[in-house]
Amino acid sequence: MYNSKSKIAEEFINHDEILKTIEYAKQNKDNAELIDSILKKASKFEGLDHTEVAVLLESEDKETIAKIHETAAKIKEHIYGNRIVMFAPLYLSNYCINECRYCGYHHSNKEMTRKKLTQEEIKKEVIALQDMGHKRLALELGEDPENSSLEYLLESIKTIYSVKHKNGEIRRVNVNIAAASVEDYLKLKEAGIGTYILFQETYNKDTYGYMHPKGPKHNYAYHTEAMDRAMEAGLDDVGIGVLLGLHDDYHYDAVGMMLHVKHLEDTFGVGPHTMSFPRIRAASDVEMSQYTGITDEKFYNLVAIFRLAVPYTGIIISTRETMESRADLLKLGVSQLSGGSCTGVGGYDEMAKLEKANTSQFDVEDHRTLDEITLDLAKNGYIPSFCTACYREGRTGDRFMALAKVGQIGNVCQPNALLTLQEYLMDYASPETKEIGEKVIRDQAQKIPNPEMKQKTAQWLERIKNGERDFRV
Ligand code: SF4
Ligand code: SF4
C-alpha cells in the first residue's frame, strides 16, 4: 500500500500507486479545466504533485505544451535568473563488481581497460581541472570494495581538497557512489562532501532487477532506500536521477521520481537538492538495441514539467546531450551544466590524454572546452557561475530550502555568480571570453537589487581584479 512516509521502498515508491496515477492521467489528458488549474498552481511556484506531473506528461495538445514551456521559462527566470552553475565529473576508478547492462564499466566487460587513479594521478587530474577553471567536481567511481574502497575514496577527497595550484582550488566535491550504510555515509559527511548523488536508474522494480542482474546493486530495496540512510547520516543535500531509456515507459519513472521527492520531503522535511535525467548513450560492450529512446520533444517536455513540479531543485544536464540540446534545455529550466568533461579515468591530465585507453563509462556528445562553453553562455546572456558558497556557508538541506522557498536564494546566487565568474576571467579565460564576460559582469552587477549588496559586490569585484580571491555571500 502507498505510504509516502514509510521506510520501505515498495511502500513509498508504490507500483500500484504509479499505475493508478498514469491511468488517471490518461483519462484526464484533455481535461482543459484541470490542466489550467495545474498550470496556475505551477506559475505561483507552488510545485506539483505526482498526479499533476502525470497529467501534464500525457498532454499532446500543442497549445498546452507551449504553455508548459512558457511557465517553465518563467519559473527558471524567477528562481535561477540567468545563472548557470558549472561543474566537471572526475572519474577515479572504473573497477566495478556490478553487471549493469547499460554501463561500460560492468564487471564482465573484457573490452574495458580497468584503471584506478593513484593519489599522485589524482593530484595531476585536479591540477588539470583547476587549470581549466573548475571549482566544483562530481566524483565518479564504480562499486568495488577491493579496488575502490571507501577508504580510498576518503583519501582521494582529502587529496582533492588539498591541491592548490596557482589560484586554483576545488571548493566543493560532490560524490556519486553506490548505495552505502549509514556508517559509511557518516564518514562521507565528515569528509566534507557537497551533494551525495545516487541515481535510481529506474523506479520500476522488474526493469531494475533485469538491468542489474548481479552484484550488490541488484538489491532494489537497498538502493531505493539509500537516500534515507544518507539523510539519517546528515547528508542533507542529495541528488537523484533516472536513466531515461531503461524502462520502456518514461512516465513510470517520472511518477516514481515524484514519489521519491514526496517521500524525502514528508520524512525529512527536505527534498532533493538536484535532479538529473540522463538519456541512455552508447557505451563499451553494451547492446543498445534493447533500449527504447525518448525523443528530443518528449525529453524537453519532461524537463520543463519537472521545472514546474520542483521549482527549487537544481536540474543538471551533462555532456551526454549535444550542444544544441543543452542550449534548448537551459531555457526550460536546467540550472547546472558540466563542461569540458572527460568520462574516462585519468583523461584530464594532458599526458594521460595522449595515452588514453578505453576507460570511458559512456560516449560524450558535447565536446566543447570549458572556455568555449563559458563563452557561448555569456554570449547568450547567461552568467556562467563557479559558485560553491552554500555548502561552505552551511546553507544545506532545510536551511537552503528555507531560503530558496521564500525566493531569497537569488540574492546570494547573483553576487556569488559574478564574483566567481570574475575569478574565472582573471585566471583562465581566453581574451574573447574575458571581453564578453566582463561585459556580462558590468551589466549584471548593476541589477543587484539590494544597494548594500550591490556596493559590496562592486568592491569585491575590484579586489578580485587586484589579485584577491574567494569572496562569497
Ligand atoms: Fe558499476 Fe555504476 Fe556502471 Fe553499474 S552503473 S556497472 S554500478 S559503474
Ligand atoms: Fe548554488 Fe548557493 Fe552558489 Fe546559489 S549561492 S549558486 S545556491 S552554491
Image (cartoon, grey):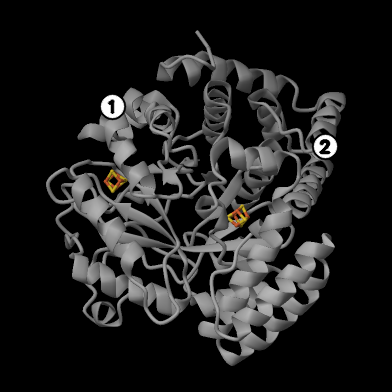
Quadrant where the C terminus is found in the figure: bottom right
Under mark 1, the amino acid is Asn
Along the line of sight, the residue nearer the viewer: 451 or 276 = 451
Label 1 sits on a secondary structure element that is loop
The yes-or-no answer for disc 2 within 8 Å of ligand 2 is no
Question: Residue 281 lies in what quarter of the image?
Answer: bottom left
- Rendering coords of residue 38 (x, y %): 79, 30
Which residue in the protein does label 1 denote? Answer: 219
Which residue in the protein does label 2 denote? Answer: 44
Q: Residue furthest top?
A: 1
Q: Residues within 10 Å of mark 1 (few under 14, many from 20)?
A: some
In percent of the image, x 76 and y 45: which residue is there?
407
- The mark closer to the camera, 2 or 1, is 2
Along the line of sight, the residue nearer the viewer: 175 or 74 = 175
Along the line of sight, the residue nearer the viewer: 295 or 319 = 319
Compare marks 2 and 1 and give the one earlier in the sequence. Answer: 2
- Rendering coords of residue 416 (x, y %): 64, 64
Label 2 sits on a secondary structure element that is loop
Under mark 2, the amino acid is Lys
- Rendering coords of residue 204 (x, y %): 43, 27
Q: Residue furthest bottom?
A: 431
In percent of the image, x 23 and y 41: which residue is there?
99
In percent of the image, x 45 and y 35: which residue is there?
247
- Rendering coords of residue 228 (x, y %): 42, 27
Q: Is residue 440 left or right of residue 329?
A: right
Question: Residue 216 lies in what quarter of the image?
Answer: top left
In percent of the image, x 82 and y 72: which residue is there?
446
